[in-house]
Image: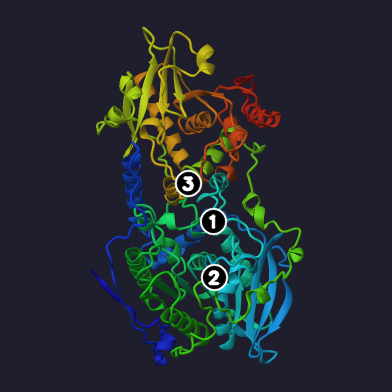
Amino acid sequence: MKTRTLLAPRLDRVRKSAGLVLSLFCFASLAQAQVHDPPDQGEPGDEMIQNYLRHETGKIEADVLGSARTAETWGRIRPRYVQEYFDMLGLWPLPGRSPLHATVTRTLNRGDYLVEMVHYQSRPGLYVTGNLYRPTNMVSSEKLPAILYVCGHSSRGRNGNKTAFQSHGIWFARHGYVCLIVDTLQLGEIPGIHHGTYREGRWWWLSRGYTPAGVECWNGIRGIDYLQSRPDVDPDRIGVTGISGGGAATFWITVGDERVKAAVPVSGMADLTSYVPNRVINGHCDCMFLYNAYQWPWTRIAALAMPRPLLFVNSDQDNIFPMDANERVINRLERIYSLFGAGDRVDSLVSIGGHAYRKDLRQAAYRFMNTYLKNDARPVLDSEVDLVTGPREEIHPISPEELRVFPKDSDIPKDAINSRVDTEFVPMARLEPSKDMRFETWKLQVIERLRTLTFHHFPEIIPPAERWQGKSLDAFAATADPFRRAQTGIVEVSTEPGIHIRLRELQRPAGRADRVLLYVTHSKVEDVPPPWMGDLIAKGDAVFICEPRGIGGSRWTRKDPPNYVERSHYLLGRTVDSGRVWDVAAVARHLRRAQPQAPLFVTGESGAGVLGAYAALLAPEISGVILSQVPESHMNEAAPVLLNVLRVCDIPDALGLLAPRPITILGTVPSGFMVRTEQLYRAAGASGKAVWKK
């Protein structure tokens, strides 16, 4: 067991020389790994997928610094890290800073402080509602330090969650700050959604590259724009703090905006080991996470705040920010800061209790901000004034209704896009062949973009699947599914370390095969091909059926919410469906190795067919694709979920990128779909190789 002692928030060397010392002491013991939920059991693929996620997490978390192990290399590589960071939030290229249209709707005079009810538009129609607290008696030319306070998940209905945290605004205003407390998207006065993949079934968020973490980051950056526009704010003395979801947002904003001079995230970050193998992700909504497309160790996010002052705050009985994760994160941060000569600017506080504010947390946060924004390290003794108290029937210093920015429902702007921002925040790509380069060169650039944002975890060449030598899944079937016991011709293959799936041979010609057909199923393997393939199969074809991971014999437990397996994947820079693309490509290479002379075609219906098309894009061994009932777009519920894919292309474009290889599409598709695919085939000089059959 390692015991941590909280030292004073460290002062920079100039302040140390002035003899300013802050002395807070708190002790916390490192607990054993804390898990959120027991592991799922009962389905044949549960153990496989849990071991896989654990193994992949360990690979990512092994190296926080990457190649940046000195101050010099960190300085060179940091701009790339920052771009990747914004990319994973859906914010790259950075949006333009449109006019804020900041408006104060009312002002409340509380004697020694004022509260302004303010709203601004972080993007056109994306309204951010907030309360701005400031001292009453100010010299007109005086510029004060400012705090952007970002809220946690505290449901206050129509009043907005900002009203639950009013005591912080009051304290800061009474101590010479301007403090802007802003509502979050989901729990604000104009509500949107945070729980898209947690419980709302909006899996296209992943394909779109949209996460509400990106919205909260951008809303905060624009909040700093607003603070800096005010004549009463010192633009060089701005800090950010908040608890829970506000703690996470503190990281998003601090890393995304160099104007933040000090940050105090309270219960806002664990690490991948905690989120994934220990299933702590199940206790969090989607605003807590970016899509880890570049496969970062999670602490690297916090490390990008260096060398700016950071106080990492947690509680020893917080089951969604557990102590074992807290220890790992702060130990890594302290090491990283010290490697680059900034070890005196990062510190931690561990409080005794659960997921909530307490006196020591408030005192530490306020004192840290005073130290770095006001050069005042004196102890804070009055942090308990004006608290919102009570379990449910709470007592508020200011009535929540008084803090509404829009007092009546009729006051809410009609042009607000908050409820549909997920459909507009991240632009969708529209592919147009370049007129300045050969089609093949342009196509390779598009595929490289896909490899970067969608298939970053793929090697350049996916290894062929191998016969699996581990425990047979049929052992499970012997008691669970009598039908599977009777099946023949099934082999189990390993497509990547830790993943094994079922492959069945449906037809073998007497001699050498003229063609190999690989049918990708979206259900368990059958002993006959689907009816729509009947006329496509010739006597000389070898026909196989592939059951990708999570399907049939390797299915795992699904609980909606919290969708543990599916959500864990995006924290590791992938999706379940990108894994299935890998499976198809690996099996295709396995079959081509066995039948090197025969052309291999991937076939599939609906979303399973689209998986085959993407496998073909990444595996040149696949000669062509035959698809039935193709979904119109990745926005369609039947389409595969592929991380960030809509920032690169949509399904009609992906099929067009297969040119000049032949494709056959069965069933009706919209005319616009055909136009987009055929446009790319024409650009490749292969117009006749895209065939549509109703």
Mark 2 is on which residue type?
Answer: Glu
Residue 546 image position (x, y, % from top left): 41, 26
| Residue 229 at least partly seen | no
Look at the image and tell me in which quarter the N terminus lies: bottom left
The residue that disc 2 covers is 258
Q: CA distance from mark 2 to mark 3?
A: 38 Å
Look at the image and tell me in which quarter the C terminus lies: top right
Task: Say what secondary structure mark 1 lies in.
Answer: loop
CB-based contact (under 8 Å), mark 2 and mark 3: no
Residue 403 image position (x, y, % from top left): 66, 75
Residue positioned 66% across, 62% down in the render: 190
Task: Say what secondary structure mark 2 lies in.
Answer: loop
Q: Which mark is residue 89?
A: 1
Which of the two discs, 2 and 3, labels the residue nearer the N terminus? Answer: 2
From the viewer's perspective, is residue 69 above or below residue 107?
above
Callout 2: few (<14), some (14-19), or many (20+) C-alpha neighbours within 10 Å? few
Mark 1 is on which residue type?
Answer: Leu
Mark 3 is on which residue type?
Answer: Asp
Q: Is residue 224 left or right of residue 607?
A: right
Residue positioned 36% across, 47% down in the render: 53
The residue that disc 3 covers is 560
- In the displayed image of the protein, which residue is found farthest to the left? 1
Residue 351 image position (x, y, % from top left): 37, 76
Of residues 283 and 395, which is closer to you in this image?
395
Residue 228 image position (x, y, % from top left): 64, 76
- In the displayed image of the protein, which residue is found farthest to the front? 393
